Image: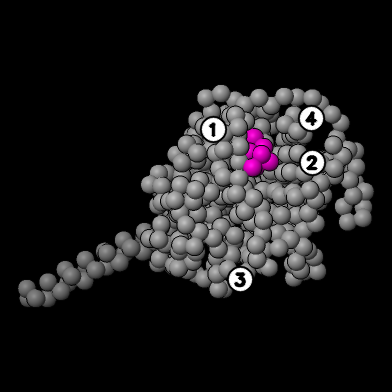
Amino acid sequence: MRTVWRWVFRIVIALVVVGAIGAFAFRKQISEYRAAFEYAGLFEPDVIDGNFRSLYKIYASTRVDKSPAASDLPRAERPLPQNFVYKGETKTIADWIAETQTTGLIVIKDGTVVHEEYLRGNTADTQSIAMSLSKSTVSFMIGNAVADGLVKLDQPVDTYAPLLAQGGYKGVKVKDVLQMSSGIGFNEDYGDLSSDIVRYIIQILTGSVNDFTANLKNQDPPGTINRYVSADTQVLGMVLEGATKKPLAQYFSERLWSKLGTQADAYWLVDKKGEAVAAGGLNAVLRDYARFGLLYLNEGKNFAGEQIVPAEWVRASVTPDAPHLMPGRDDGHGGKALGYGYQWWIPAERQGGDFTGIGIYGQFIYVNPERRVVIAKTSAYADYNNSWEKMESETIAAFQAIAAGL
């Protein structure tokens, strides 16, 4: 009889354990569904403007102190060109500003602000989400770590972040990840709630972006195809933290934000475990984004003339060095692809050695070295999922016209 009761007891315990596991899994699934629903609602036309200046408040974030003193940005207003040509059609700059739902636009020529305006509720003090503009600042940090001998571009990323050895990033070189050529399979469709990028975002709200990233699978040989994979930048963040032994936001503060002459604090979004969202979590004011553009215009020298990232790194960052990275190549859809460097984009039809950082929904830092022009733009372009390619290519054409017109 004792044996029978012992087995009954074991069965009951097993059922309780199975039930508990099932309940946990169910709660996790419900939590992820809720996060997906919440994510989808962020970009509705009636709330997108307010959300884009409030994400660092809505979600967990880490504050980064501004520089001890802001660098001077002298002003001398000048009219922008009235028109530009895009695919044979003449458009007005004013219409482009409105149609792309611009929230802030600043134009700097020869170190002087010649145009600055804020729209749709934004002001000079608004903290705007950078989205994937954040990636270019991560590249800056990698440049510092390389210069310090802490990171080598030809080393596998799992050398610095052992967690990455358990998935598709095992053995992939830092440089291939830096150039969005990791070979990882990744669906970057923000409009598809089952896509990899949305799953990445759900992890921000419910779990660990690093764990998610570490378990992605490879699809192609590294270094052969330029596929935009936001998780690649998350990997770079993991590499930085492993190599420097510092949280990403701390290294960002020490090497960039405190030395840039920034006028306002910045904020990095973090996930439930406090891990920085390296791929798109930076929030800052428009003028400080422009200051970062000026840093790259001046080949890594800040406002005080201090070389805070090697000039060689800046040049390499905006110089594609393999066929699959070149601007103007066939994009597979009858168009010309943008080129890609170290987390910077190169226009398909380059003018003046120009390059740009791009964030989803219309965030830009554009630099034209020959014309000494920097343009920073924040937007809340609600139709992004349907017409992002047109919006981005049209915006680059507008930037090039502004640079040429000044």
Badge nearest the viewer, 4 or 1: 1
- Label 3 element class: loop
Q: Which residue is mark 3?
A: 224
Q: Which residue is mark 4?
A: 114
Indicate the position of residue 303 as horizontal and vertical percent values: 62, 30
Looking at marks 4 and 1 on the same chain, the residue that comes earlier in the sequence is marked by 4
Q: Earlier in the sequence, mark 2 or mark 4?
A: 4
* Residue type for callout 1: Lys
- The quarter of the picture where the N terminus appears is bottom left
Where, by quadrant of the figure, is residue 311 drawn? top right
Amino acid on which disc 3 is placed:
Thr
- Magenta stretch encompasses residue 296: yes
Q: CA distance from mark 2 to mark 1?
A: 25 Å
Q: Is residue 146 left or right of residue 369?
A: left
Residue 339 in percent (x, y) is at 70, 59
The residue at 41%/57% (across/down) is 160
Mark 1 lies on residue:
259
Secondary structure of the residue carrying tag 2 is loop
Residue 126 at x, y percent in the picture: 64, 31
Q: Do tag 2 and tag 4 residues touch (Cβ < 8 Å)? A: no
The disc, 3 or 1, on the residue closer to the chain's N-terminal end is 3
Magenta stretch? Answer: 291-299
Q: Is residue 13 visible?
A: yes
For the residues labelled 3 and 1, the Cα–Cα distance comes to 36 Å
